[in-house]
Image (spheres, helix red, strand yellow):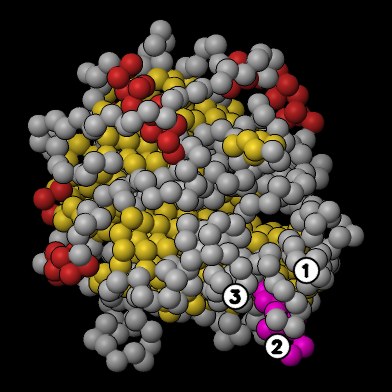
């Protein structure tokens, strides 16, 4: 997501609300890019590295404000930098009505509470993300790679004018989890224009107040509780969410467009670091759930297991892969501190129940064509909070879960997977190009059965360094060979062949966001068969008998000045009744610069999205 393209607006009711909220002059927040303060280290605090700041409620608000503002001043414009930060808040209350704590979150910054539950850390103020402005205007289209979790925000920003409220104007790879907001929340920064946004992911959260979707073209909310939700644009999807808008697709007199799934079929919440009542650091691993509704902590506390930090190896960027693998082989889990890790050999996760948790969007970068990480076919593994980058030499895959059937290995497929203890992959983001040159045939390959994918963004870069049809080459974002694999919040963009290939049985996708590659040089260079133009965004193998998908969109913006077409956005078997897709859409983006389009939504069903109907969803409600 990059180009400043025309977007459908927020709608008259929301514009009325925004006009009221913007009745005052915006107050700019300007922090100087001074040298960053040295993190304070208290007794009993583990060595989490120089880029983890642990705040205590006894610290003066002014001291905390100075630190977070300095980090924001560095990170807000730092889209492809190597700096990574985690801002962690111990249990207690921060800020007050008289002296609130309000701060901005930039790139590669994780903000998290260290309580057992979100109510243990309370911020009176706001933790916000706003538009970025340049000569083309002010938008949130590139507000990636940051996160907010495990705390309560009592919105307190008097005198902020238009910016009053909790602003979380983000796009992909910017999750909000386990957050309780008391007050107005807006996912659109309507204080500067044109305010386009392309999010987004919220899970396990509660909002006591209005949530303004505004210009967010799509958004996914899972297992949360809403006060009210303002509007839809193209693809707003809710799963297991209390007070979610009623199903309404496509948009019409009922409002919408909304896809509403009553209960989430399978989920596994992300593990998190916390401090217990004795001051010891631990990692909590939530239990898996089926047919779940609402936030996991609504009954009082999230169910699961607590692991002492002594059971983790705390990795730093200076550690070798050999050291990390030796620690994993000894039965330890892995806490990956903020930084960029050059990975020239595979990090191998072999033990059932292993937790690999990244802080501060820790990044693994493939070197010399290595596969950065593999997971054996064992149950209950959790991989969370990592960004995985391709390097300049092609890697066959960036993250592999289980071994391919027929591989000469002791980790045989279908060996030990467990429906009762599925493997979880949460907030894991892949990049091919962008910060540097990169090539990878496949980003994520899932061969094990019983895997939950929760908030995945696989991105072949459309801007940054090393970007071009023959430079950042990447065939497919996700291949699923395992059975009973579910994806909740799946974002896959710009790959050069079929972006998702699903070969496993009983697969499920709730919310899918896709953009086809922008930079296809010619139709001849992009044919999936001699007679089929282009590649579908998501392909379900012809041998699959059962699969379901809901709230799935694919967009085209072919920007090379020639007409490029994809015959189908989605391809699924036609010979079985066990495959069902619900609420599908395609969109042609930007009549001023785009060419070609998508000829059909699914197989040969659904109309075309071309320059004849720009920025207008072409929909199929149910297939077949």
Assess whether residue 344 is covered by the magenta stretch.
no
Q: Callout 2: few (<14), some (14-19), or many (20+) C-alpha neighbours within 10 Å?
A: few
Q: Which is nearer the N-term, disc 3 or disc 1?
A: 3
Q: Mark 3 or 2, which is nearer the eye? A: 3
Which disc, if any, is residue 470?
3
Quadrant in the picture for residue 70: top left
Q: Residue at x 49, y 47 (%)?
A: 79
Quadrant in the picture for residue 161: top right
Q: Is residue 555 left or right of residue 416?
A: right
- Residue tagged 1: 598
Front position in the image: 110 or 426: 110
Q: Report the magenta residues as a range.
A: 526-536
Q: Is residue 320 visible?
A: yes
Front position in the image: 177 or 112: 112
Indicate the position of residue 229 as horizontal and vertical percent values.
62, 35
- Residue tagged 2: 529
Q: Residue at x 38, y 84 (%)?
A: 404
């Amino acid at each position: 997501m990059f180009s400043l393209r025309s977007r459908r607006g927020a709608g008259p009711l929301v514009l009325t609300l925004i006009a009221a909220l913007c009745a005052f002059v915006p107050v700019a927040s300007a922090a100087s890019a001074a040298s960053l303060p040295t993190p304070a280290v208290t007794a009993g605090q583990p060595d989490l590295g120089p880029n983890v700041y642990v705040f205590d409620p006894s610290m003066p608000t002014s001291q905390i404000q100075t630190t977070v503002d300095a980090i924001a001043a560095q990170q807000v414009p730092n889209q492809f930098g190597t700096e990574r930060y985690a801002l962690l808040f111990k249990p207690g209350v921060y800020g007050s009505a008289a002296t609130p704590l309000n701060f901005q979150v930039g790139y590669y910054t994780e903000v998290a509470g260290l309580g057992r539950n979100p109510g243990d850390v309370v911020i009176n103020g706001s933790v916000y993300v706003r538009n970025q402005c340049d000569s083309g205007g002010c938008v949130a289209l590139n507000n990636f790679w940051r996160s907010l979790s495990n705390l309560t925000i009592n919105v307190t920003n008097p005198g902020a004018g238009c910016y009053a409220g909790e602003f979380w104007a983000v796009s992909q790879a910017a999750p909000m989890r386990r957050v309780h907001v008391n007050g107005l929340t807006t996912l659109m920064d309507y204080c500067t224009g044109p305010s386009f946004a392309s999010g987004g992911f919220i899970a396990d959260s509660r909002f006591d107040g209005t949530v303004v979707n505004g210009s967010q073209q799509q958004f996914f909310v899972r297992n949360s509780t809403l006060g009210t939700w303002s509007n839809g644009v193209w693809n707003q999807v809710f799963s297991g969410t209390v007070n979610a808008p009623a199903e309404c697709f496509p948009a019409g007199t009922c409002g919408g467009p909304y896809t509403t799934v009553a209960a989430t079929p399978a989920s596994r919440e992300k593990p998190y670091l916390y401090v217990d009542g004795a001051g010891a650091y631990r990692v909590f691993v939530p239990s898996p759930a089926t047919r779940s509704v609402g936030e996991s902590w609504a009954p009082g506390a999230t169910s699961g297991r607590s692991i002492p930090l002594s059971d983790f190896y705390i990795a730093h960027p200076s550690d070798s892969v050999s050291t990390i693998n030796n620690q994993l082989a000894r039965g330890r889990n892995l806490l990956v501190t903020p930084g960029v890790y050059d990975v020239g050999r595979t990090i191998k996760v072999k033990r059932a129940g292993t937790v690999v948790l990244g802080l501060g969007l820790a990044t693994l970068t493939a070197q010399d064509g290595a596969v950065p990480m593999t997971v054996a076919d064992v149950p209950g593994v959790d991989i969370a909070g990592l960004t995985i980058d391709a390097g300049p030499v092609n890697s066959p895959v960036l993250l592999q879960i289980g071994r391919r059937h027929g591989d000469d290995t002791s980790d045989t497929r279908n060996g030990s997977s467990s429906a009762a203890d599925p493997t979880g992959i949460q907030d894991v983001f892949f990049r091919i190009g962008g910060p540097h040159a990169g090539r990878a045939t496949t980003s994520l390959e899932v061969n094990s059965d019983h895997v939950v994918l929760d908030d995945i963004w696989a991105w072949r870069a459309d801007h940054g360094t090393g970007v071009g049809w023959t430079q950042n080459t990447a065939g497919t974002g996700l291949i699923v060979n395992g059975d009973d694999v579910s994806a909740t919040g799946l974002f896959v963009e710009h790959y050069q062949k079929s972006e998702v290939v699903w070969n496993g049985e009983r697969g499920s996708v709730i919310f899918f966001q896709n953009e086809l590659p922008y930079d296809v040089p010619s139709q001849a260079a992009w044919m999936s068969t001699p007679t089929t133009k282009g590649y579908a965004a998501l392909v379900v193998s012809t041998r699959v008998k059962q699969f379901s998908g809901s709230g799935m969109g694919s967009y085209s913006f072919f920007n090379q000045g020639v007409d490029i077409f994809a015959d189908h956005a989605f391809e699924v078997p036609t010979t079985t009744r066990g495959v069902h897709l619900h609420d599908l859409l395609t969109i042609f983006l930007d009549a001023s610069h785009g060419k070609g389009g998508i000829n059909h939504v699914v197989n040969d069903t659904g109309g075309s999205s071309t320059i004849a109907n720009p920025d207008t969803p072409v929909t199929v409600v149910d297939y077949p």
